Amino acid sequence: MQDNRQQELEAIAKRFGLSVGFVEAALSVKQAGTVAEKVEAFARERRLIEQGNPEAVARQHEKGRLTARERIDALADDGDFEELDSWHRPYETGFDIGEEAGQGDGVVIGHGTIDGRPVTIWAQDATVMDGTIGTVHARKVTMIMENALNARTPIIGIFDSQGLRAHDAIQYPDFYSFGSMAHFQTLASGVIPKIGLVMGPCSGELAIIAGLCDFIFMVRNTSYMYLMPPASSIDSQRLGDPWAVHAKIGSCDVLVENEKDCLLRCRQLLSYLPSSNTEGPPLVDTGDDPNRWEEELLEIVPVDSSKPYDMYKVVSLIVDNGEFFEIKRYFARNLITGFARLGGHTVGILASNPQSLGGCMTLDAADKMSRFVRFCDAFNIPLVWLCDTPAFLPAVDEETRGLIRHGSRMIMANSEATVPQITVTTRRRIGGGGLAMPGQCLGGDLLVAWPTFQSGLMGAEGAVAIMHRKQLAAISDETLRKQQEEKWIEEMQWGLDMQVREATQKIIDPRDTRPFLIKALKWLRNKKQDLPQKKHENFRM
Amino acid sequence: MSGRIKEVEERRSHLLKGGAPKEVERQHQMGKLTARERLEKLVDPGTLEEIDLWIRSVKTGFPIDETELPGDAVITGIGRIDGRPFCVFAHDFTVAGGTFGRALHHKVIRIMEMALEKRMPCIQLVDSGGERLQDGFGKPAWRPLLGGANPSVGGALNIYQAPGIMSGVVPQITVMLGPLYAGSAYSPTMADFMIMRNKTSFMSVCSPPLLKAITFTDATQEELGGAELHATITGTADFVTETDEEAIEICRELVTYIPLNNTEKPPVVDTGDDPNRMDDRLLEIVPADLSEPYDMHEIIRCVVDNGQFIELQKLFAKSLIIGFARLNGRTVGIVANNPGKENGILTLNTCDKQARFIRWCDAFNVPIIFLVDTPGFLSSVEQEQSMDGLIRTGPKPTFAICEATVPMITVCIGKCFGLARLIMGTLRMGIDVAYCWPSAQVARINPEEAIDVIYKKEICSAEEPDRVRRDKLAWLLENHLDFPYHALKQAMVNDIMDPRDTRPVLIKTLENLANKKKLPTAWKKHSLVPQ
Amino acid sequence: MPLETIEVPLAGKVLKVNVNRGDKVTEGSEICTIESMKMENPILTPVSGIVKEVGVTPGQVVKPHETIAVIEY
């Protein structure tokens, strides 16, 4: 009798591609006589789904990774996540894909809150068929993306998947797949913040979907990301190594040491961002005095422009409580980008870093800047530049990689930005470097400088060497020539010194920088600037 | 009055001469035309309406103040090309080396503002020594009116900001006929199209003497910013020409394909080519074995009006072809893989090239035709981990296609699997209609990859894995991936057609799609295109 | 023991070299200073370890990707 029943259950399980346990639960739903019993029976089913396959969960933990639901628990406010579509099942493929435990089709989707603000989350579940992407999986992700867009909440995607499920892809139409995901990623671009947490494998088409996010987080050692599967000589972990993706390629915005940290940092980032492009960023009571003067700012920048100094220190002294959320820390280190608060309002900070490449601008720094500026502009976050740059780095490599092409994109991004833009020159704003940090010339609102300000197209020596080349060459006596040259350099320097006063709107006391910026941002808070109607600009890619 | 008029004309003809005769002669000796000669060739005869010829240079306090600088080294104005109006300007190298003085800045910004406000394309002919140091170091640098930031009088734009604001509103074309170094070079680079003349035009942020002085490194002008470098390696230049005349001729041809601004459609030209023309050559071009190379240009020429195709970035990322042609007199943008070069693979550079072109066509209402046959990306550590990394560059074309709202039609000619489909566009991404030829092999996953995934166990445990793989592949191709019907059954393409029908079908479909208008979507200031 | 090679990040002139072969260095300490773009650019070691090789001498003109030092850590 018992055996017969077991066989019956197994037959049903086989027919519907379910686990026997699940069929048992389904049976009690069927047999439930009251609504309360049905509720309880469905809850049993749900618990089964949420438990998942213990072996697969153990395997996931062995890899140093959490499961999708554990991640969501750590990410969203306590117990505040509503999962949707958890019963949805993969399409039958006729192949053995372990679908009997496939509820949810390898992805957990739903909505929750972070710091009390609603967010939309989808997280790939590597314990279900390796998180591979079948039609149902793709449909769930696509639809939750559309939900997030319509609801105007930020969307967080957690990537941990072996990629496309081949068995499914060869049999089912191309309705829901990467194409539809990319479509909504693009529609939502510039409307809601999109954050991708790469916490496991992410390759091929999925890497493109991740690449369409505004910010990508990666976890050292346990995640990797690349487009094409590696040829035999290199393993996938090395090919898509988070360090390389972060520091060299610059795709990864935030690199973290472990999963817990990743989720915590994601929460932090969201605290700086508005929920959508029609809102301002949240106002946070940081408790820091808006009028705080910092004596230390007088001492940091050396007057001698050949001496570097710590720009991070400058940033931390100015912003609320010294809190700075840095984006792309090790990529193009000569430019620092990140979020901070001034008087409780989010600002995007872009600062030259004189400790790296002398604060020169480079191609990568230009990319870093234009991407950051575009994001802040789309989401109403004012921009503050701290400028100390001598020029664009003169190097053959840079030119042949297309410095002009990338640099012009940065200038275009700066020109098109209509959020409040303030530049504080801490020391040098020279030549093309000055273009990088927009003053009024690129539609910036304010251009002020510290007393250490140096301006101009180039140094006086260089200008004399070019402008008076012929005259100098004509003087045969070396002492005389030297004398004449020095005289001209001095004259020329006077020109530059005078320019200091005209090339900035105000020389401010470094100690006053914080109060000054807070006041200026208050003045500019309602800034509105319209540009001619266009679909979009035509960036040089 | 007639005396006055005579005087005016004398003064005018003096200014029109430009720089000193010996400077003009030197310009000619270098094989270059003067700015005025160039403009005469660029616009229809006698149509140039010059603006601000009479402007006086701003006094600098340097000896250069004693020199007369006609027009302050630039000619600006509105001229007609084939009867359509264009804002044009040309640096006059015979006057102070075409350097940017304050008055020049003012004139250039003014003409850019004209282009923006009057919705005309802006064409610049560049030949300049860059910023004029006397202005950068002399009085104008600290005089508020024209100082510091060089804003135009009455406006807030400057020559670095205006192209960004104009971008996507009016087309911009740069014709580089001479040098331009340092930060100044950014302004012309923001243009949509760039034509560079070989051997005389150089464009880089760092000039060779500066590089030498600061970093003790030797490099020639060619290595740092020659036309060839920009056409083949950096992908900044669209065309390379050997003479001024040729460059200007290309510019004149190019503008016939483009609209005057983003609210118009490109002009319709009576090309006289039969819309129903069927070309038998189309049956012969694609080899039976798709791994053999063939030239996609031939297919393009068979399909478009009179075989006329103006190719952009011909020397850059050659495995992908982009350019303009006409179908029944209407401009279309063509994006085509080229199996004739490197098998038509996708690379970092093809992604950049493709994405930018699609975005241009989208901004200026030009329908796009995709001709697809690509094996996809190569697995390459070098490309993957290069500074521009594949994962940073790969999403660009995907984004561009999803964002585009102009009619888009795909013709699948050969292979396109998996990832490559995301790059070349799928129906879900906004392609309107997709066709395939009988030669097409389209699937959501590369069959070889699918085999390795689906039959991993069998292949790994087999004694002869290759044989198992071959058998399984044959089975899969027969039962699931039966090319070309597989793509049709799975709704990846809408219909299959006789290659000879390509032209009539495309023309008919384009007519059907002519009124395509973007469905309302969430308001945004702008999208965040991957960078 | 793995080796870390510190390369020249930008072309310039070596002003001073602070380490010799066999020295012990800690993460973040200055290996040498390169003058470029009229700036003194400190070159820091990303790892702690022992200097195995020093590739530059004061006054030397260096180009990108030349080896400054090799550190075993």
Image: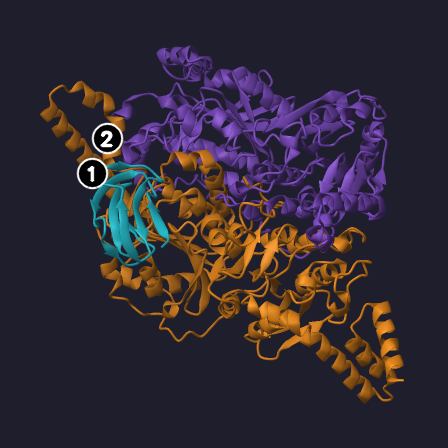
Chain colours: A orange, B purple, C cyan
User: Which of the image's four quarters has the C terminus of chain A?
Assistant: top right
Where is residue B506? Give x, y as percent. Answer: 80, 33
- Mark 1 — on which chain does it sit? C
Q: Does the rendering let one see residue B431?
A: no
Left/right of residue B229 with respect to residue A66 in the rendered view: left
Reply above or below: B178 against A437: above
Residue A495 seen anywhere in this rendered image of the structure = yes
Judge depth for marks 2 and 1 and give the one in front.
Answer: 1
What residue appears at the point 51 percent right and 38 percent down from the top-left corner?
B163
- Mark 1: which secondary structure? loop
Q: Label 2: few (<14), some or many (≥20) within 10 Å?
A: many
Residue B318 marker: none
Distance of label 2 from label 1 (alpha carbons): 26 Å
**Nearer to me, C63 or A344:** C63
Q: Which residue is mark 1?
A: C59
C-beta proximity under 8 Å, tags 2 and 1: no
Amino acid under disc 2: Val
Q: Amino acid at mark 1?
A: Gly
Give the image location of residue B368, x and y in percent. 71, 37
Q: Residue B425's spot in the image, x, y percent? A: 70, 44
Q: Of the numbered discs in the image, which one, if any, rests on residue A464? A: 2
Q: Secondary structure at mark 2?
A: helix
Q: Is residue B500 above or below residue A65?
A: above
Q: Quadrant of residue B252?
A: top right
Q: Residues within 10 Å of mark 1 (few under 14, many from 20)?
A: some
Farthest residue to the front: give it. Answer: B463
* Discs 2 and 1 lie in a common subunit: no
Q: Name which quarter of the figure residue B93 lies in.
A: top left
